[in-house]
Structure formats: C-alpha cells, structure tokens
Image: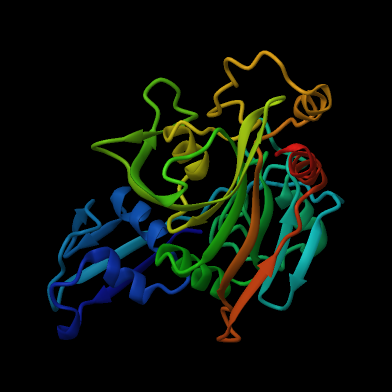
Amino acid sequence: MNKTTTFFVEESSNNLRLDKYLASKLKTLTRSQIKKIILSKNVSINGRAISSPSQKIKSENSIEILIKAKKIEHIKPQKIDINIIYEDKEIVVVDKPSGIVVHPGAGNKEGTLVNALLYLYEKNLSTLNGLSRPGIVHRIDKETSGLLVIAKTNFSHANLAKQFSNHTIKRKYLALIWGVIRPLNGKITTLLSRSKKNRQLMSVSERTGKKAITNYKTLKVFNNKEIPKISLVECVLETGRTHQIRVHLSHKGNGLVGDKKYGKKRLGFRKINKKFEKILSGFERQALHAKSLGFLHPTKNRFVNFESKLPKDFKKMLDFLEKFSD
C-alpha cells in the first residue's frame, strides 16, 4: 500500500538539502533510497514536484513524500549450506563461497544467498531493500568469496547502510594479480561508470561516474622461471562501487588471476610448470577474497571485526606459489 507523509520545515532546518532533511526524518530509509524517490518525482514542496536531491528547503515549506509499496515477489526459501560465523538478534555475518549469487535477479531466481537466508530466518530479515533482497545491505560478486553482513531488522539495516555511506566500514580483500603493480603500495582514485561498450561492465572514467578509492599493498611477489610473475595484494576499500577492485587493478595493468571479464590473459610466457597450469585451469573464478569486515555494531555500540580463512581453491594456488617461487 502506498504511503504519503507530510513534513513542515522547522526554522532550524532552513536552507538544508532536501535529501539530507528527509534522511533525518525517515530513519527507516537509506539516503540512496530517498534519492531515488526524489528523482522519481515523488516528493513535492508546497505542491510542486521536485526532482533534485540537492534542492534547498526553506522554513515553513510543506514537504510531501510518496513512498510506493514495492511489488511483492515470491522468493522460494531453499536449504542451502552457508557458513554463518556470527549472529545475534540484529545481524548475521556470512562467509560466502564463490559461485553463489547474493540475491535473485535476471537468470538467478533460485540458489542465491537470499534463498538460503529465507529458509533459515523466514520473515526475520530487514525489508529496506525490498522483498526481493531481504536483509541485504551490501554485495560481493558471484565469483568473489568472503564476508557479508546481513541485517535482521530495519533499524540495523539503516544503521549499517549509513556506515557504508560514510565509508566507515572496514573491508580488506586478498587478491592474486598478474605481474607486479607499480608502485608496490598505493592508492587508486578514479571515477567509475558503466562501460559504453558493455553495460554489464564498469570502467574508469575521466568525467562521469562515482568516485572510487582503493588502497592496496603488495604482500609478496612470486617469481620463478617456470611460472608467470604473480603478486599477492591486500586491498582496503574506502568506497564500495560495483566491481571496484577488479576494475581498478585491471586499470593499473594487473588484472586478477582468473578474472574472465576484466583480467588480461598472460602473454609471452611459453614454458609453464605443468602442475601450476593444472591448478590454474581448475581455478574457475577471479582470485579475490573478502577476508575481513569491521563495523560499529548497530545496537551494542562497539566496533566488531570478523575474519575469514582463505577458501580451498585460493589456498591451494597460494600454497603452490609459496613453495615453488624463488
């Protein structure tokens, strides 16, 4: 059922941005959700539809916001093994394996993390992201493994979403890349937008898109005459854009090992160790793992941090590199 809410702007809120004002009033909605509502012209000031989130408001303005009921989608609960490393009344922390999609979408109606969560928790998940994405605060790619925090309540969801928006969530990833990134340690800052050639991919842009910041540190370079040069890199995100690490590393000329979309095939390497070639051919995803996740607990008011062990396929490749490299 659609819901219309009206606010009368107080003197203390004079000259605030419209989206910021509504975010302070509607605690169960995230800033991005409010922005979408405004862009859809479902907010009016003194009876006039507004489509700009940055619109300045004045004291005594009458602001009306229409929140449309989301279309109900039936998602089938499924018994799927998932590794839960922590849970309480507010949140669940999941260690997602590679190969599983986070939520249903085109071509992925079943077998997702959401299907598994619905089986375990039924209706005890937040609904701020709609009924097709219960509990989902953030995502990692299908072929990326590692940690995700799930919200059980709308309060926790809004709290965590704000932390993500403020870039205070601590996220570390481990990646295996082709070659040696230069400089060995640094920060990549670019704009990211949809690729003009392929709308399913992201690309670095000079003029348009969202700001993306990735800090990286080279942990080790594996070098041997019988294998291509590969580096183990730790990435710390300041922002969380779609495919951010994959695009940034590819942009530097050091695509992820196993990345079929952004990675570059190894070139000019004729002789390769047979055992490593077998490991490489059996590695069917990008070598990227979300190893740690830290945030302020929504209700306990203390910082919590979670760590994930490397999955078997990633560890197998890394162990071989450790033993075989000079």
Q: Quadrant of residue 300?
A: bottom right
Q: Quadrant of residue 64?
A: bottom left
Q: Position of residue 302 (x, y in %)?
A: 57, 85
Q: Residue at x 38, y 63 (%)?
A: 31
Q: Is residue 187 above or below residue 207?
A: below
Closer to the camera in the image, 187 or 195: 187
Closer to the camera in the image, 265 or 64: 265
Exactly how many numbered labels are in the figure? 0
Residue 106 is at least partly visible in this image = no
- Colour pattern of the rendering: rainbow
Q: Residue at x 30, y 49 (%)?
A: 39
Q: Quadrant of residue 63?
A: bottom left
78 with respect to 237 (left or right): right
Q: Position of residue 108 (x, y in %)?
A: 69, 35
Q: Is residue 155 above or below residue 138?
A: below
Q: Position of residue 110 (x, y in %)?
A: 75, 40
27 with respect to 130 (left or right): left
Q: Quadrant of the C terminus?
A: top right
266 with respect to 166 (left or right): right
Q: Residue at x 62, y 72 (%)?
A: 153
Residue 189 is at least partly visible in this image = yes
Q: Is residue 21 above or below residue 279?
A: below
Q: Position of residue 74 (x, y in %)?
A: 70, 46
Q: Residue at x 60, y 21 (%)?
A: 266
Closer to the camera in the image, 189 or 243: 189
